[in-house]
Amino acid sequence: MIEKPNFFVFTGGPGVGKTTLLRHLQALGEIVVEETHRAVIREQVAAGGSAVPWIDRGAYARLTARRDIAIFERMAQETRRVFFDRGIMDSHGGDGVEPWPEIVEALRTRRYNRLVFVFPPWREIYETDAERRQDWPEAERTFETIIRMLQGLGYAPLVVPKGDVAARAAFVLEHALPPNLSPP
């Protein structure tokens, strides 16, 4: 088992400010990991592939999970604080896809910090695009689903308050493991 108390996950539905905050933290000198979900969608659309949530949700979930597992393993020796735009758990049961053995094992053996930052739906900043097709009601349902999923996986969801990016960054940094504290 690999436990990484210095690995912090940002999760939530699309269009809630995760990536904006991640980029802000990166500008402050924090180590960040971009999300795999949008990258997979872009690549699949460009290649005419079907592993996108609106065609083959199972293939999409498996592809993003494999990438997230590989990133976790590649960074396993990192002792500094790292912020992830989504994590392995974001492919667990997402979009109604039944968990499969590989992801169940990965979630058991690769653990992020127990505290997971969850971004709530925020109507004022929410918008759809070619990769983000959820409507507003689905975005609201996604938030509730994520909270239940995290609790079921033994994580402690912490809702990030709405506000400007500096206020959100201050909130996250206040609750995250200090950068100079290495995991055991």
Image (spheres, rainbow, N blue to C red):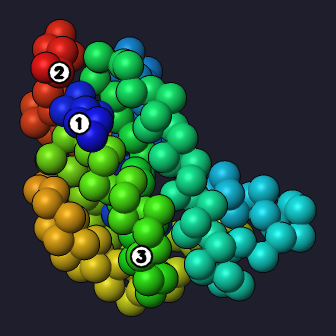
Q: Position of residue 48 (x, y in %)?
A: 89, 70
Q: Is residue 81 visible from the viewing direction of this image?
A: yes
Question: Disc 2 designates what residue?
Answer: 183
| Few, some or many residues within 10 Å of mark 2 (<14, 14–19, 20+) | some
Can you name the residue that lies furthest to the top here?
180
Q: Where is residue 56 in the image (x, y as percent from the top left)?
A: 68, 82
Q: Say above or below: 36 vs 27.
A: below
Question: Disc 1 designates what residue?
Answer: 3
Residue 170 vs residue 43, the one in the foreground:
43
Q: Is residue 136 visible from the viewing direction of this image?
A: no
Can you name the residue that lies furthest to the right here?
47
| Few, some or many residues within 10 Å of mark 1 (<14, 14–19, 20+) | some
Q: What element carries label 2?
A: loop
Question: Disc 3 designates what residue?
Answer: 99
Are dots 1 and 2 in contact, CB under 8 Å? yes
Q: Say above or below: 168 vs 143.
A: above
Amino acid carrying label 2: it is Pro
Are dots 1 and 3 in contact, CB under 8 Å? no
Amino acid carrying label 3: it is Pro
Where does the N terminus fall, quadrant-wise? top left
Question: Residue 45 is drawn in which quadrant?
Answer: bottom right
Which residue lies at the image location 21% right of the left edge and 51% below the top edge?
116
Report whether 81 appears left or right of 113: right
Q: Where is residue 58 in the image (x, y as percent from the top left)?
A: 59, 78
Residue 165 vs residue 38, the one in the foreground:
38
Q: Is mark 1 on a helix, strand or loop?
A: strand
Amino acid carrying label 1: it is Glu
Which residue lies at the image location 29% right of the left edge and 36% below the top edge?
2
